[in-house]
Amino acid sequence: MTVASNSQSGNAEVPPVLPSIPLTPEPGPRDASLGALAKDVTTHLSTLVRSEVELAKAEVTAEVKKGVQGSVFFVIAAVIGLFSLFYLFFTLAEFLSLWLNRAAGFGITFLIMLLVAGLFGLLGYLRVRKIRKPERTIDSLKDSAQVLSQRGKGDNVRELTDRPSA
């Protein structure tokens, strides 16, 4: 099922036009058998689910595009802010040179920068060190693989499913 395009394809605010659900005329009470009605229900249900999935894809895609466009501005602002820090450190060094020799002002500023960078590096290391592997997911995948390998062997599967879950 493809998404039909609208006349304002360049406008990100207008969601794409999705196809409607093709429904067949309702049969009279004596026109269709129970099997034909069940087939129609199944067809309509699958078409409805596919249409809902297409709608969700279209909405999520539009919102992701907005997010990406907005994040570009945040990245630009961050880059400009980082380059501006260079001038802040020069200003600090020149300010210290009012009382100290100019080289000492720049040296002290450099040491302050190194200490701050070291502090943030340590904080980052401590955060990354806390990352653990996904134990529950690994256990679940191992259990699933074990169940699938025992498939069709009879009583062994019952033993696996009788275990208490965590």
Image (cartoon, rainbow, N blue to C red):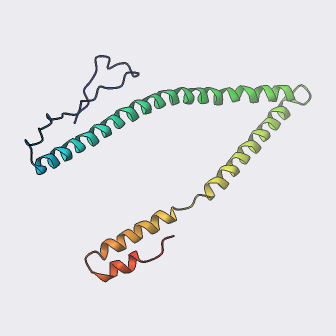
In the displayed structure, would residue 43 be above or below residue 59? below
Is residue 69 or residue 115 the one in the foreground?
A: 69
User: Which residue is the extreme one toward the bottom?
Assistant: 155
Q: Residue at x 62, y 58 (%)?
A: 129
Closer to the camera in the image, 2 or 91: 2
Q: Give the number of marks.
A: 0
For residue 72, side relative to residue 141 (left or right): right
Residue 92, horizontal then vertical, whole percent: 80, 29
Residue 99 at x, y percent in the picture: 92, 28
Identify the residue at image location x=76%, y=44%: 115
Residue drawn at 36 percent across, 74 percent down: 146
Observer-nearest of 146 and 95: 146
Q: Is residue 21 left or right of residue 145?
A: left
Residue that appears at 27% across and 80% down: 153
The quadrant of the picture occupied by the N terminus is: top left
Residue 151 x/y as whole percent: 28, 74
> Residue pushed farthest top?
7
